[in-house]
Amino acid sequence: MVEYLKRLSSLKKLCKEKKFDSYLLSTMDEYLNEYAPVNKQRLKWLTGFSGSNGLLLLFNDSFIFFTDGRYTLQAISELPSSIKIYDTSKYTIFDFFNDNQSKKTKLCVDSKIHSISFIKKLIEVTQKKEIKIHFNAGILIDHIYRFNSIQPSKHAFLLSNKYTGCSAKKKINLIRNKIKNLYCYIITSPESVSWLLNLRGYDLDFTPVVMSRMIFFNPKKIILYIDKNKLTKKLNIFFNNLGISISSEEQIHKDLKKIEKNKKILIDKDSPYYFYHEINKMNFKYEMIEDICKKEKSIKNSVEISSIKKIHIYDAVAIIKFMFWLEKSRQIYNCNELEVAQKLENFRKENNSYFSPSFDTISATGKNGAIIHYNPKNMKPKKLKKGDLYLCDSGGQYFGGTTDITRTFLIGSRPPKKEYIKIYTNVLKAHIDLAKMKFPKKTLGIQIDVIARHNLWNLGLDYNHGTGHGVGNFLGVHEGPQSLSKSSINESIKEGMILSNEPGYYKKSKFGIRLENLLLVKKSSYKNFLEFDNLSLVPFEKKLINKNELDSIQINWINSYHKQVFQIISKLISIELRSWLKDKTRTM
């Protein structure tokens, strides 16, 4: 902690030297990745905060930190006590600026690591106050930031059409048709570029993207901005055949200045603000839009869906082996949370299609389960203990799909506490009520979110995170624009989207319970209606279910789900494991 206090003090000194009263730093890198590369985790280096969503404000000699409900307890445990912490579901940075009048404050904002939409809102709020924003073309903290590790530059690779269901050529033509008669479209998201070109790589630990950007110049010119060392001879030929020119990542900033001023530019509203600032500075005509690739990739085609369903079967086999080990092995009491998480990954690695985790496994026993996004790598991991609840939220990247699943287990054979049963049963009811929904087309995520929460609300309980997020196809485990949450996002749930279903409850310093499956949105038998199809195939913990609190429809849902789990998975596991799974999925 002393080291972080020294670094924060160095940042204050730097700001004074540069004549700034305030400074803003987020967890994101120059590509606005949710999970930044190790050598770009500036906020973690500065403060010790290891979560994926945080915003630090140095404001007139005080530090204020903003994060969402998943990370508030984690921030309290990781950050120096001198930093004031706010939960953004209750109080945002915009609320802070609204509430704090300051005499001619000069705020430094790094334009490369904040989005256009965020900065535009920040400008709107600060204009009402005496706050002048200085947009820094570089990244201010890099004057003091020291990180010695060099990121490896591995070759990128193409994902086969048997997983994507659509060639890069077809996707490029789709984009061209949508920007017809426009001169220029800038794509700044590596995830969008990777989807568009069926390109994958090793640039991030949990998301197989390749750091890159693209510009479409109509009618035919396309430039891909990428580290050329990542390209093989095969990839260079592939891009040449598609009519794509290759330039370095830095060249995009120079090429922006060469764009004809009387032509119109399209740019994603969530691009780094730097691009908007440069376009504005040069008086270009422009229009800000939703990333076209983002919307297109959120709806999976039939080939992708078939592949993703297979991957979930593979993943279920690994998790069921893990559950069996967790229940039958005496070794578990000698294992800490990190070692248990590694055991689960070892089971996943038994499948040849496995590529990597899709995020750092949340392996939390006892009171650590109350920290929504607890990561044992950043704490002193606890050993599993009889009678405790153990929450495990994990996922895998496979060639052909991305998984994300959470189960909460009772460790040992002791009878569970009544409170555990009460909460687990009601979280499961929330999970079931959402999973069995039928809803009309054009329904928004916020309208569905309330269905999951109502059972818990009736007990005076709630959870401080969304009920569901979108999931990519061998891409980001968190994918937009779709979501199920309290946030008013104007994006309807559409056929072909994949969403998580993950209600929970967390009792501070006591325990946490979350139950998560991934759902595919499909057509309903009712005209103009949609419904969900479960992709995840892992049983629930019957020892923690009070059947008497369930209605007949919910009981039938559990029995039907468990029957499906056994029918599909039993063919792929050993006789001993099959016998155990039969008992786990027996009719209630």
Image (tube, rainbow, N blue to C red):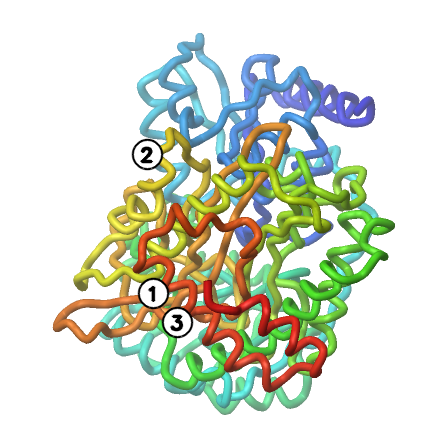
Q: Closer to the N terminus: mark 2 or mark 3?
A: 3
Q: Comparing marks 2 and 1, which lies closer to the viewer?
A: 2
Pick whichever, 529 or 193, lies toward us: 529
Image spot of residue 523 (x, y percent)? 24, 74
Q: Residue furthest left?
A: 527
Position above or below: 406 against 154: above
Position above or below: 556 against 149: below
Q: Comparing marks 3 and 1, which lies closer to the viewer?
A: 1
Q: Residues within 10 Å of mark 2 (few under 14, many from 20)?
A: few
Q: Secondary structure at mark 2?
A: loop
Q: Answer with the quarter of the image where residue 286 lies.
A: bottom left
Image spot of residue 85 (x, y percent)? 56, 23
Q: Any mark on residue 223, and which?
A: none
Residue type for callout 3? Phe
Q: Any mark on residue 295, and which?
A: 1
- Whether residues under marks 3 and 1 lie with C-beta atoms below 8 angstroms apart, the answer is no
Residue type for callout 2? Asn
Position above or below: 183 against 19: below
Residue type for callout 1? Lys
Q: Secondary structure at mark 1?
A: helix
Query: Is the N terminus in the top left, top right, bottom left or bottom right quadrant?
Result: top right
Residue 327 in view (yes/no): yes
Is residue 446 toward the left or the right of residue 153 in the image? left
Q: Comparing marks 2 and 3, which lies closer to the viewer?
A: 2
Q: Any mark on residue 216, and which?
A: 3
Image spot of residue 440 (x, y percent)? 17, 62
Position above or below: 253 against 372: below
